Image (cartoon, grey):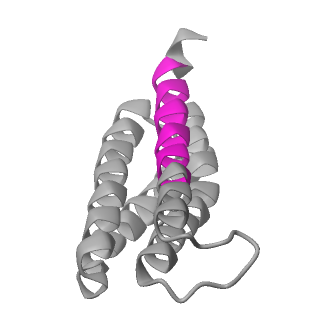
């Protein structure tokens, strides 16, 4: 089981990231008095919500690919890709919060990591 320790730690860190972003949504809703059940026009709440949901959408794809790459391929490369992906998600969140038009580059970095993780996992399965 020790060989999967890094993948497990990565999974925990990724879960903590999504929790932090969910907490940020809650904090913005509270700060701007935005009811959870109602649509809001407050830009900060909308941005916090979009950052969280976009990250969750990425996590749903990334975590299974991470495990596939860690089990069937070189887990060291998977770990490096995760570090880059993780940093890109934080960069994405900060960019989106400050200026939504600046989120494209960190988004693309994350997508590239996901594609590379898929290729790494597929390679490990095939060869």
The residue located at (37%, 58%) in the rendering is: 89
Q: What stretch is highlighted in magenta?
A: 5-22
For this orientation, the residue located farthest to the front is: 33
Q: Is residue 122 above or below residue 115?
A: above
Q: In which quarter of the image is the N terminus?
A: top right
Image location (x, y in percent) of residue 17? 46, 45
Residue 95 highlighted magenta (yes or no): no
Image location (x, y in percent) of residue 72? 58, 36
For this orientation, the residue located farthest to the top is: 2
Image location (x, y in percent) of residue 53? 58, 67
Name the residue nearer the viewer: 83 or 18.
18
Name the residue nearer the viewer: 46 or 118.
46
Res. 94 image quadrant: bottom left
Q: Is residue 1 above or below residue 18?
A: above
The residue located at (31%, 83%) in the rendering is: 100
The residue located at (26%, 61%) in the rendering is: 91
Residue 126 in view in this figure:
no
Q: In this view, does 57 lie above or below 74?
A: below
Q: Quadrant of the C terminus?
A: top right
Q: In this view, does 57 lie above or below 99?
A: above
Per the picture, the main secondary structure of the magenta-coloured stretch is helix
The residue located at (60%, 66%) in the rendering is: 57
């Amino acid at each position: 089981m020790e060989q999967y320790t890094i993948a497990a730690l990565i999974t925990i860190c990724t879960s903590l990231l999504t929790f932090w972003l969910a907490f940020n949504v809650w904090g913005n809703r509270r700060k701007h008095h935005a009811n959870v059940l109602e649509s809001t026009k407050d830009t900060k709440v909308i941005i916090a919500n979009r950052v969280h949901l976009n990250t969750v959408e990425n996590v749903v794809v990334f975590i299974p690919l991470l495990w596939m790459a860690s089990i069937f391929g070189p887990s060291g490369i998977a770990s490096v890709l995760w570090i880059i992906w993780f940093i890109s998600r934080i960069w994405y969140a900060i960019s989106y919060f400050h200026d939504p038009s600046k989120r494209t580059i960190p988004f693309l970095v994350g997508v590239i990591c996901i594609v590379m993780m898929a290729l790494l996992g597929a390679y490990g399965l095939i060869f």
